[in-house]
Amino acid sequence: MVAQTQIQARADARPQGGVAPAVKMEARGVKVFYGAKQALKGIDLDVRDRQVTALIGPSGCGKSTFLRCLNRMNDTIDIARVEGLMTLDGQDIYDRSIDVVQLRARVGMVFQKPNPFPKSIYDNVSYGPKIHGLAAGKDEMDEVVEKSLQRAGLWNEVKDRLREPGTGLSGGQQQRLCIARAIAVSPEVILMDEPCSALDPIATAHIEELIDELRANYTIVIVTHNMQQAARVSQRTAFFHLGEMVEVGDTEEIFTNPHDERTQGYITGRYG
Amino acid sequence: MPMSVLVAVLVALSLAGFYMGRSRALDAAGGRMANLHSVPGYYGFYAAIWAGLPALLVIVVWSAFGGAVVNALVWSSLPADAVQGLSPSQQSLLMTNILNVAGGNAGAAETSPVVRAAAEYHQHLRGIGRWALAALAFSLAVGGLWYARSRITPSLRARNQVERVVQALLIMCSLVAILTTVGIVMSLLFEAIRFFGRVSPVEFLFGLHWSPQTAIRADQVGSSGAFGAVPLFAGTILISLIAMLVAVPVGLLAAVYMAEYAPPRVRATVKPVLEILAGIPTVVYGFFAALTMAPLIRDAGQAVGLNVASESALAAGVVMGIMIIPFVSSLSDDVINAVPQSLRDGAYGLGATRSETIKQVVLPAALPGIVGAVLLAVSRAIGETMIVVMAAGLAANLTANPLAAVTTVTVQIATLLVGDQEFDSAKTLSAFGLGLVLFTVTLCLNVIALRVVQKYREKYD
Ligand SMILES: Nc1ncnc2c1ncn2[C@@H]1O[C@H](COP(=O)(O)OP(=O)(O)OP(=O)(O)O)[C@@H](O)[C@H]1O
Ligand SMILES: [Mg+2]
């Protein structure tokens, strides 16, 4: 009930027609090489503030690679090299003065495969807030953990077993745990790499609801193979193909009236 | 016919069997492989096995028991008055004499006619045996070949039969390893039981005084023998503890560096170099401990006014620790590397620093494997002998002072059994008691370590 009115209130607060929302992150001519192999061939893309941007495209086209550029996760891959400009709030995130640890605290990530730490469910969620000192005292931490788990739709299933290992959960539960873990740090941008690929329809609907809710406060970039999902949750959609970004636009536009025939072919299921 | 010729003939027959079997199978199938149950090669192996295996088994059985049979025949041929009234040791002496003469190893001058006759009879029997063996093996091989040839039809399940033989071979090989282990344990156990017949286990396990010299003459002083092994256990524990205090932190940190920080090129050189340390013979570490480390520690101790024995537990422990470092670091490096990258990504994605990720995510995830590595290292330390012999001395002191000379279980075992010993004194038998304790302890450690490591594997594979 409360949640519903909140969503309503936020929907009202959303910028109305004509006024484009501010750009949160910006990519200009981003190229990524894995060794000699080029995975991204110059991507220009704006990620708008407090909107959901969906990245779609056939497997291996570089969606995850682009997502990983946004919080510099590619730094952890030895052979990966990133070129081009990438900004967060107008600041170059590949600049020397940027502390990558702080960047990742601001731009959080949920991975394609669930990767809970081999710790208890509680410790999984409290890990981020703990290392960033976001909760003073145990009560506050309890609250953060409960709220994060509730928002990820996992609370009811795990509230009696918070001390059990997170690795003991089912695949879908693990993925929701990872989502809870990511939102517990309250990042400004949340990157989600196919967050629902391991979930059943009910849990998926729940996550989609969550994304819709988070959009009021957070900027979200989501990779998905599910066209309906992209249409349902996102405001903007970008279509990637073979390391290039073919087309980006309002979700409605992309799905009803794509300009490029590759986009059309993909969303109507002619290839992918 | 010498054995080597016989074996060569058998090999040749088997080879012939192989080609014969293969071509016969193809002929029987009318040249079309599809008509055969198995690939033609299997028919070849089938024939080769029939040609070689039965003959080989006969040779093996003869090698194992033929000598004993011949000896028994020779013995029973001896005239009754030559054997009468001989004690068992005299009997075996006589038999040895006969065998020596038969083998042409003894001067003919001092041998009695009885012995010479027996030796001749022995040679005669062996000659017959050899020829009989050759004839039997040869006819078995030819017969086997003929039998296999008659059996080969397109529907013969040659592959299944060959595979069964190969499987039996594999089982036999693993049995050899297992039986050897059982044999070692048994011999240890029986000798230890003999020892515990003389010294009570309670005294052995809980006695505080170790002095294994037993009196050779009744009037000897102070050599009644005391077999309280606690000082040895204490010494072992002390030295192992020092070794682990050196090896675990250094090895673990080296592993963390190699797995998490080192650029690939550094890692590619450092890891093998560290592993070379593991290949140095322990005797060489012993030199290092006795000639470099011990004087160093003594001088350092004297400089600060401590009284350090020239052979100290500290010197041996430190060098043993150095020896174990590659063991710990290599195993830990493997388990740290086995922690999935996705876990690290998860932590980095939350804004964790590299050290936070390592301390709070990677190491806890790798902990079971690291514990396993450390336990294996402990059993290595407990079993180490050479360094301690050379650097820690032989004095069975019951002390916790790392600067004093101590001795360990393994060192005592070595010294108790070095040289010519009678194997029925409490002194030498005590080595088996010690060995049994050592074996039990390291076995338990290894079992626990393997369990821990296995549990860890289940989680990520
Ligand atoms: N760590 C890596 N090392 C080498 N090449 C990589 C690496 N990660 C990705 N690639 C390559 O980069 C290209 C893009 O991969 P990416 O993971 O971004 O695809 P994707 O669009 O996310 O595909 P999917 O939908 O299947 O997840 C692929 O060709 C892939 O082989
Ligand atoms: Mg992907």
Image: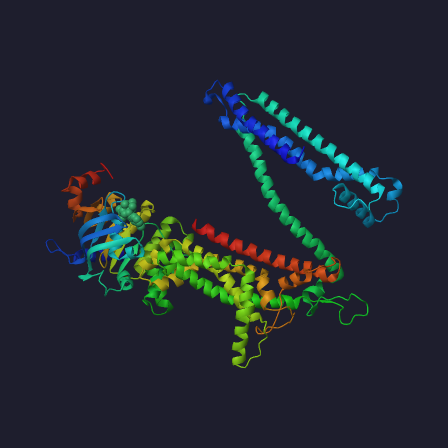
Instruction: Give the residue displayed 58% in from the left and 71% down from the top.
Output: B312
User: For the view shown, which residue lies furthest in the bottom direction?
Assistant: B305
The location of residue A63, given as percent across then percent down, is: 25, 48
- Quadrant for residue A71, please give it: bottom left
Q: Is residue B220 above or below residue B257?
A: below
The location of residue B42, given as percent across then percent down, is: 52, 28
Can you say which quadrant of the picture contains the N terminus of chain B?
top right
Q: Is residue B71 above or below residue B90?
A: above
Q: Is residue B154 visible?
A: no
Counting the numbered discs, the total is 0
Q: Foreground: B211 or B390?
A: B390
Color style of the picture: rainbow
Q: Is residue B101 visible?
A: yes
Is A191 on the left or on the right of A171, as rendered? Answer: left
The location of residue A266, given as percent across then percent down, is: 21, 40
Instruction: Give the residue displayed 32% in from the left and 45% down from the top.
Output: A201
Is B388 on the left or on the right of A120, as rendered? Answer: right
Q: Is residue B378 above or below residue B399?
A: above
Q: Foreground: B175 or B419?
A: B419
User: For the view shown, which residue lies furthest in the top direction?
Assistant: B30
Instruction: Give the residue displayed 59% in from the left and 71% down from the top.
Output: B311
User: For the view shown, which residue lies furthest in the left direction?
Assistant: A18
The location of residue A33, given as percent across then percent down, is: 25, 51
